[in-house]
Amino acid sequence: MKNFLREHRNDYINATHLMYDTSRMTENERDRIDKEAQQFVFQCRELLKNLRREVRNQSLTAQQLDHHEGVLFLLEGHLNSACNLYTEQKAIRVKKAYDRQKLSRLEPERKKPAVHDADGAGEEVPWSQAENPPTAAPYGELPDLFSFDGWDENMVISYEEFQMFEQENKKLYEELNALSDEVRNIEGRVIEISQLQKVFTEKVLEQDEEMERIAHTLGGATENVKDGNEELRQAMKNNAGFRISLLFFLLVLSFSLLFLDWYNP
């Protein structure tokens, strides 16, 4: 699982999708990877739990038991590493999907500038298709403050159009700044959630191990109680035999004294 996630990491998180649609993996394939990864982790945890139970139920020496426990600990560490890698990639994917959704709202529409004809009718035509553009706007020639390098000398925009473009640029700049702050907040929250999920996964595994230890300890305590009951039962039998022997000895001694008293008055 870890090698598979590393191999398809770039396609899964789709690092270039904000600018270009170059990913070779669809959203359905990413969802399928999420589902299969979760099923794989669940199955591995169940297998490790069953394996630990089988190991503790077997009659093994202390050295063999330590060896099996060490192998299980290494397997759990490898599984935790794969879970952390999957959690990290999942968080990056969620963050990038959110960024893409936000930036798609601010994608500017291509606008065609207005070119006034010689009669001042104000008909809008694309700059690339204007063959003989007029030489002046209704407000006359604009000062050098509003001229742009690379434009045609005969192509001039009005002062109102310039103000409109400037207001749109200012509005877009403010929206981008607000979006940047919101993206940073979301990024911090996603990282926080990822860290909390990592800690939660570790705590769940620790609690699982602790429950297995408690179950193993309870099994040992039950065996000790059974052994104690057997020893008590054996001690009770021994005490009963000792009392019978003592009573028999006292009876024999009493009869012996009576016989001696009768034989030698």
Image: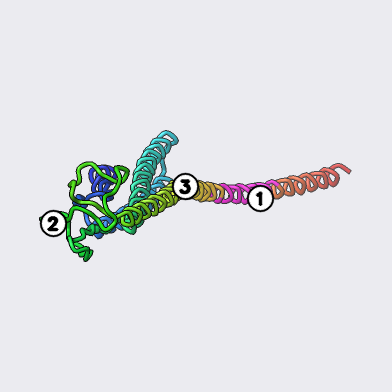
Residues at marks 2 and 3, CA–CA distance in whole angstroms: 55 Å
Give the vertical position of 36 relative to 60 (above or below).
Answer: below
Provide the secondary structure element on which disc 2 rests: loop
* Res 113 label: none
Which residue, given by chain and number where applicable, does mark 3 sit on?
A: 192
Q: Nearer the viewer, mark 2 or mark 3?
A: 2
Q: Are marks 1 and 3 in contact (CB under 8 Å)?
A: no
Q: Nearer the viewer, residue 153 or 109?
A: 153
In primary-sequence order, the first of circles 2 and 3 is: 2
Which residue, given by chain and number where applicable, does mark 2 sit on?
A: 130
Q: Of the residues shown, which amino acid type is indicated by label 1?
A: Met
Secondary structure character of the magenta stretch overall: helix
Residues at marks 1 and 3, CA–CA distance in whole angstroms: 64 Å
Residue 224 locus on image (x, y percent): 57, 47
Q: Residue at x 23, y 64 (%)?
A: 122
How many marks are shown on the rendered structure? 3
Q: Are marks 2 and 3 in contact (CB under 8 Å)?
A: no
Badge 3, how many Cα within 10 Å: few under 14, some, many 20+? few
Q: Is residue 198 visible?
A: no
In primary-sequence order, the first of circles 1 and 2 is: 2
Q: Give the magenta-colored segment's residue range.
A: 222-242
* Res 236 label: 1
Residue 45 locus on image (x, y percent): 38, 51
Residue 205 locus on image (x, y percent): 45, 48
Badge 2, how many Cα within 10 Å: few under 14, some, many 20+? few
Q: Quadrant of the C terminus?
A: top right
Provide the secondary structure element on which disc 3 rests: helix
Provide the secondary structure element on which disc 1 rests: helix
Q: Of the residues shown, which amino acid type is indicated by label 3?
A: Glu
Badge 1, how many Cα within 10 Å: few under 14, some, many 20+? few
Q: Residue at x 26, y 50 (%)?
A: 141
Q: Of the residues shown, which amino acid type is indicated by label 2?
A: Ala
